[in-house]
Amino acid sequence: MLKKQLHLVSQVVREGISDVRNSLNKLRPGALEQAGLKGALQKMITEFIGLSDDLQIDLNYEVENIDFEVAKEDALFRVVQESITNSIRHGAANHIQIHFTSLMKI
């Protein structure tokens, strides 16, 4: 009986941890709060590169004077994150180039 209860508790804890992870992934990344979009991208790129011996990711960020709204900044970060992940996972990429430029005259 005790073994069965422990198993149930263990299962509930695992589900809870999974729910917390899913919730955290939906939240704004801390790096965006601390360093802005460019800093968060640089941090993410460094983390991706740290996971692979032969991965090169170049970031060309030419939108220094644009202050993105929070929602847009979040979306841009997630798009780049997903693009890098998909490039590695599905395209076996070892060199990725990311260009952020503005077509607007400021």
Image: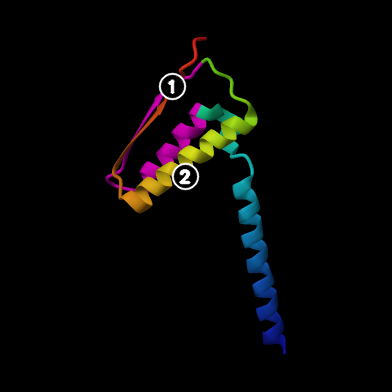
Question: Which quarter of the rendered picture does the N terminus lie within?
Answer: bottom right
> Does the magenta segment cover residue 41?
yes
> Does the magenta segment cover residue 81?
no
From this view, report whether residue 18 is shown above or below residue 78: below
Q: Which amino acid type corresponds to the residue marked 2 in the rendered image?
A: Glu
Q: Residue 72, position in %: x, y?
A: 59, 31
Q: Give the secondary structure at mark 1.
A: loop
Which one is in front, 26 or 29?
26
Tell me if 11 is positioned left or right of 106 in this view.
Answer: right
Residue under pointer 2:
82
Q: Residue 4, position in %: x, y?
A: 68, 85
Q: Give the secondary structure at mark 2.
A: helix
Which circle's residue, 1 or 2, is located before the other in the chain? Answer: 2
Residue sitting farthest toward the top: 106
What residue sits 47% from the left and 33% below the top?
Answer: 41
From this view, report whether residue 2 is shown above or below residue 96: below
From this view, report whether residue 70 is shown above or below residue 104: below
Q: Residue 9, position in %: x, y?
A: 70, 75
Q: Which amino acid type corresponds to the residue marked 1 in the rendered image?
A: Thr
Which residues lie in the magenta part? 38-64
Residue under pointer 1:
101
Mark 2 closeness class: few <14, some 14–19, many ≥20 residues within 10 Å = few
Q: Give residue 65's mark.
A: none
Q: Residue 35, position in %: x, y?
A: 55, 28
**What is the number of callouts on the image?**
2
Residue sitting farthest toward the bottom: 1
Q: CA distance from mark 1 to mark 2?
A: 19 Å
Mark 1 closeness class: few <14, some 14–19, many ≥20 residues within 10 Å = few
What residue sits 27% from the left and 45% below the top?
Answer: 54
Q: Are marks 1 and 2 in contact (CB under 8 Å)?
A: no
